[in-house]
Image: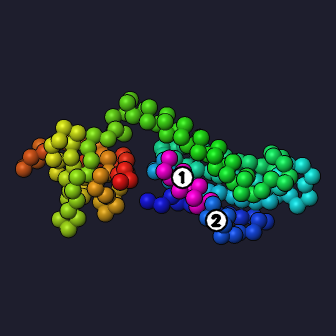
């Protein structure tokens, strides 16, 4: 999944190098938290005649489920007037990374209190042409699931190796998941 990104430049020339730097930093945010559902970035030069402080403002606004909004901003009164825009962008993203890491650590700590967020199985096999797949439970059992059991993603977006939790019931041919919730992406191999 690519993080939804809104990037705005105001009174600052939009260059390929700035866009590349910002995209690299956004990719890093996505590696820290792969379930961010929005990222808005504004890069601007609000005052043309400024005697102190850097002339740029960079604001990053990130939304993370279930209802968190994180903001990192570096304004014109911070730093010195000679400060390069790339430096201001990096510092603003560094501050956002710290906030995001702190939130993710807090949420992971809450997993122990909220079993619905814990990974208890991995998607082992998908059979999209037959609208079903199989989970590999922590105890090694194979659990069948139908595409209609997936509650927080589209079946066609699933990947083998994704972490899930599920509600199990006994089906006609053995254990099956009545609901499947994706809680993590497959680790990069």
Spot occupied by residue 153 in the image (x, y as percentages of width and height): 35, 55
Q: Is residue 11 above or below residue 77?
A: below
Which residue is identified by label 2? Answer: 19
SS type, badge 1 = helix
Residue at image coords 13%, 45%: 175
Residue at image coords 55%, 37%: 102
In the rendered image, the quadrant that contains the C terminus is bottom left
Spot occupied by residue 47 in the image (x, y as percentages of width and height): 86, 58
Spot occupied by residue 110 in the image (x, y as percentages of width and height): 43, 32
Residue at image coords 59%, 40%: 99
Q: Residue furthest left?
A: 173
Q: Which mark is residue 28?
A: 1
Classed neighbour count for the residue bearing mark 1: other residues with Cα under 10 Å, few (<14), some (14–19), many (≥20): some
| Quadrant hosting residue 157 | bottom left
Spot occupied by residue 82 in the image (x, y as percentages of width and height): 84, 54
Q: Which mark is residue 16?
A: none
User: Which residues make up the magenta segment?
Assistant: 22-32
């Amino acid at each position: 999944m690519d993080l939804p990104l809104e990037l705005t430049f105001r009174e600052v020339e939009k260059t390929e190098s700035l866009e590349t730097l910002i995209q690299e930093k956004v990719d890093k945010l996505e590696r820290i938290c792969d379930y961010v559902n929005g990222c808005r970035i504004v890069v601007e030069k609000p005052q043309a005649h400024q005697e102190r402080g850097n002339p740029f403002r960079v604001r990053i606004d990130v939304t993370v489920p279930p209802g968190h909004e994180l903001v990192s901003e570096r304004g014109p009164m911070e730093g010195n007037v000679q400060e390069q825009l790339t430096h201001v962008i990096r510092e603003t993203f560094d501050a956002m990374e710290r906030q995001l890491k702190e939130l993710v650590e807090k949420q992971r700590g809450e997993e122990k209190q909220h079993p619905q967020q814990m990974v208890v199985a991995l998607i082992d096999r998908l059979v999209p042409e037959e609208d079903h797949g199989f989970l590999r439970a922590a105890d090694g059992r194979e659990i069948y699931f139908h595409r209609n059991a997936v509650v927080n993603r589209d079946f066609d977006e699933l990947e083998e190796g994704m972490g899930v939790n599920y509600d199990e019931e006994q089906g006609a041919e053995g254990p099956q998941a009545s609901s499947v919730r994706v809680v993590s992406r497959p680790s990069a191999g």
